[in-house]
Amino acid sequence: MAQAVLGVALALALALSSPAAFADKNNPAWSELRPSQQRVLAPIRSEWDALDAHGKLKWVGIADRYPKMSPDAQARLQRQMKEWAALTPEQRRAARDKYREFEQLGPEEVRLKWDQYTQEQAAKEAAAKAIESEKAASAVESATTERGAEAPSQPQ
Amino acid sequence: MNEHQFAAKIGPVLDAGLRLEPAVLARLEAARGRALAAQCAGARAPATSVRDAASRRGTPVGAWAQVGLSIALLVLALGGVHFWQEARQAAAANARITEEIVEVDTRVLTGDLPIKAYLDEDFHEWLKQSSE
């Protein structure tokens, strides 16, 4: 009888303690990361404590893939990490959905379209600035002309 | 008296058989009949309680309590195992989802497109129009 009670108590203790163990393992503090993970995740060090458990696990997963990436990919990752971490969860979700959509269109084609789009936008902005500058210049010119015409009639 | 001498003495007595008087035989038979009737009546009577049934079969009430407690503990243990398995399955499902997200995030962050390309709705509209 005593053995049965002990067995059941042991089983319950195991059952109740396991999820708690998972939770600790899945929510690592910065100091609990390996040095190699800390090096990769250094750009988001200041945001780490504010991340939820899921966010931390995700970054740990990315850091673990880092050694297998090409140098270019590593550089792009390091460059974009902070910007990605600063997005809201909704923005990140929307970006992932859009990524999957772009995968269907063909990543290379989308990249070319992005280059074309940014060039068009830059040309439009330059044209708009040129028009504004032209307007400003003509306004100055007309003001000068008006002052020149009005000057003789002004009392001394 | 050794074993053989005792056997030689008791053998003839047993061979001769038990010769009892008819009155003694009648009393013995009546007593046997009463004992059998009492035994049959006890077996047929319904159990009115666990205590009654337990005592009738010679089982102490404490044994029933032990059986009940064992069943309760077994149910509790099965519940614990079920809870543990559920937690394990949920953790495995979360791990799968996290793995998928890590895969997509890694591709987004290491890809040629800047992050703003995924969030620029004007670009998405322009892309849709240019594809038509």
Image: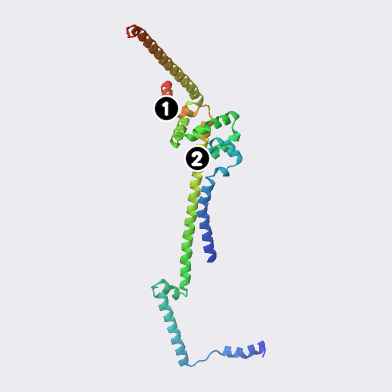
- Chain to which the residue tagged by mark 2 belongs: A
In percent of width and height, residue A144 lies at 38, 10
> What residue sits right under mark 2 in the picture?
A55
Amino acid type of the residue that numbered disc 2 sits on in the rendered structure? Gly
Front one among B132 and A33: A33
* Measured Cα–Cα span from mark 1 to mark 2: 25 Å
Chain of the residue where label 1 is placed in the rendered structure = B
Find residue A88 and report its horizontal and vertical position in percent. Answer: 45, 36
Pointers 1 and 2 within a single chain:
no
Left or right: A24 as drawn, with respect to B52 = right
Which residue carries the number 1 mark? B121
Residue sitting nearer the eye, B18 or A6: A6
The relative height of residue B69 versus residue A143 in the rendered view (above or below) is below
The label on residue B49 is none
User: Marks 1 and 2: CB-CB under 8 Å?
Assistant: no
SS for callout 2: helix
* Residue A13 location (% of width, % of height): 52, 57
Which quadrant would the N terminus of chain B be assigned to in this image?
A: bottom right
Given residues B41 and A57, the one toward you in this image is A57
